[in-house]
């Protein structure tokens, strides 16, 4: 048992409360296992009507996953990283297929693994504290935990933009893009949770009652530029489009992409291209697991976590170093299915 996530039963409600404040509630394998097991139990319990997911003490909803462990494992045989992804994706899939209502409170940093926890929820509550991103191209990973599914289903080329740049959205922007279903002031969350606890079948009515109009979504001012500049599924063409556009926005994005892992960016584009056509979320997670297992065997995760988390010099030396050097053959190998003995399947 881990204390890093609190699993509570209160009447007809199941509560999942992330409780690892020192790491902004980033998910460990033990936390994912505990959530997976609780959902398994609750799925078959006719007295359980609904589930809420939030964080207990401290700021931030969930900063991501245990990327130090992933990087350390990647420097060795990769077994612990594969174990982590297997249980995390199992949790993501169980949330996605859970038949009773789930409400996720994205009150603060909601990145990477936190996106995988919240996006499968029927009710996704944003606040003025929400900071939402899929920042994995900074550390040589890719927008996993179903990112290839959710991001590829956003309007236009917003998903490709978010996946490549790791751009942070605020709560109002999440609502405007459909990543959140409701916008509440953070001060109203205790009342929302109390009223949901009293009447789990009335989640939607409670949230509608406490929701307030969101501020303007700044990202919408760039929607046309994003759809145009990120239109291609080829990284080199996106970089050329940014290069040839004379706007501050394009210049900023071009500068930003120069810092990201070229391999991770190419993996992300293919993930979204394939993800949009995936017949089921199960197929998506099987693909993402295969990609994760192959990426763990490459050098960029170790280097990215070193540059961003360990040394914090923000000067990664990517390998391959340029988009041109990331061959189609390398991408094909990264997307190759695993053998039936190794592949991911629902828990
Ligand atoms: C990209 C990422 C992550 C990140 C930073 C990136 C990520 C993640 C964390 C993180 C942050 C604070 C913590 C922690 C993890 O940062 O996935 O344990 O205390 O989990 O640029 O993908």
Image (cartoon, rainbow, N blue to C red):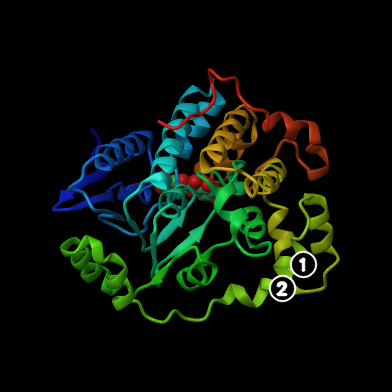
Direction from residue 38 to residue 305 in the image, left or right: right
- At which x and y percent is residue 236? 82, 51
- Frontmost residue, 93 versus 304: 93
Mark 1 to mark 2 CA distance (whole Å)? 6 Å
Q: Which mark is residue 47?
A: none
Rendered position, 278 above or below 159: above
Callout 1: SS: helix
Callout 2: SS: helix
Quarter of the image holding residue 107?
bottom left
Residue density around tag 1, few if under 14, some if 14–19, many if 20 or more, within 10 Å: some
- Frontmost residue, 127 versus 346: 346
* Residue 313 visible in the snapshot: no
- At which x and y percent is residue 268? 66, 46
Direction from residue 50 to residue 279 in the image, left or right: right
User: Which residue corresponds to the image point at 33% horizontal and 39% vertical from the top-left?
Assistant: 31
- At which x and y percent is residue 23? 37, 47
User: Which residue corresponds to the image point at 37% horizontal and 58% vertical from the top-left?
Assistant: 60
- Frontmost residue, 290 versus 75: 290
Q: Quadrant of the C terminus?
A: top left
Question: Can you identify the residue that label 1 sits on?
Answer: 228
* Residue 334 visible in the snapshot: yes
Q: Given contact means CB atoms under 8 Å apart, are the residues at marks 1 and 2 in contact?
A: yes
Tell me if the residue at label 2 has its CB under 8 Å from ligand 1: no
User: Which residue corresponds to the image point at 52% horizontal and 46% vertical from the top-left?
Assistant: 146
Residue most toward the left?
11
Q: Quadrant of the N terminus?
A: top left
Rendered position, 24 above or below 340: below
Rendered position, 35 above or below 229: above
Question: Can you identify the residue that label 2 sits on?
Answer: 224
């Amino acid at each position: 048992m881990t204390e890093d996530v609190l699993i509570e039963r209160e009447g007809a409600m199941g509560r999942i409360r992330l409780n690892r404040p020192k790491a902004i509630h980033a998910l460990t394998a033990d936390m994912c296992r505990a959530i997976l097991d609780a959902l398994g139990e609750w799925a078959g319990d006719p007295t359980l009507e609904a589930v809420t997911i939030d964080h207990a003490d401290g700021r931030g909803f969930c900063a991501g996953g245990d990327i130090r462990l992933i990087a350390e494992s990647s420097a060795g045989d990769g077994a612990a990283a594969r174990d982590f992804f297997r249980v995390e994706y199992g949790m993501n899939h169980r949330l996605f297929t859970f038949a009773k209502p789930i409400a996720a409170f994205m009150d603060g940093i909601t990145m990477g693994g936190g996106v995988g926890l919240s996006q499968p929820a029927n009710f996704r509550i944003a606040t003025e504290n929400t900071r939402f991103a899929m920042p994995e191209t900074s550390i040589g990973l890719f927008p996993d935990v179903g990112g290839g599914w959710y991001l590829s289903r956003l309007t236009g080329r917003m998903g490709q933009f978010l996946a490549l740049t790791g751009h942070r959205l605020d709560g109002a922007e999440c609502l405007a893009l459909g990543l959140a279903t409701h916008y509440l002031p953070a001060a109203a969350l205790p009342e929302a949770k109390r009223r949901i606890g009293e009447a789990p079948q009335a989640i939607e009515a409670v949230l509608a009652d406490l929701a307030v109009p969101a501020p303007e979504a700044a990202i919408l001012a760039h929607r046309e530029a994003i759809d145009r500049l990120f239109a291609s599924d080829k990284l080199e063409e996106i970089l050329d489009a940014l290069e040839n556009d004379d706007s501050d926005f394009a210049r900023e994005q071009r500068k930003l992409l120069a810092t990201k892992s070229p391999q991770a960016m190419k993996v992300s584009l293919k993930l979204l291209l394939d993800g949009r056509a995936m017949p089921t979320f199960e197929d998506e997670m099987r693909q993402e697991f295969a990609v994760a297992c192959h990426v763990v065997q490459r050098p960029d995760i170790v280097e990215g976590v070193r540059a961003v988390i360990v040394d914090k010099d923000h000067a990664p030396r990517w390998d391959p170093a340029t988009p041109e050097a990331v061959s189609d053959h390398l991408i094909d190998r990264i997307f190759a299915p695993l053998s039936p003995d190794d592949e991911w399947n629902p828990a």
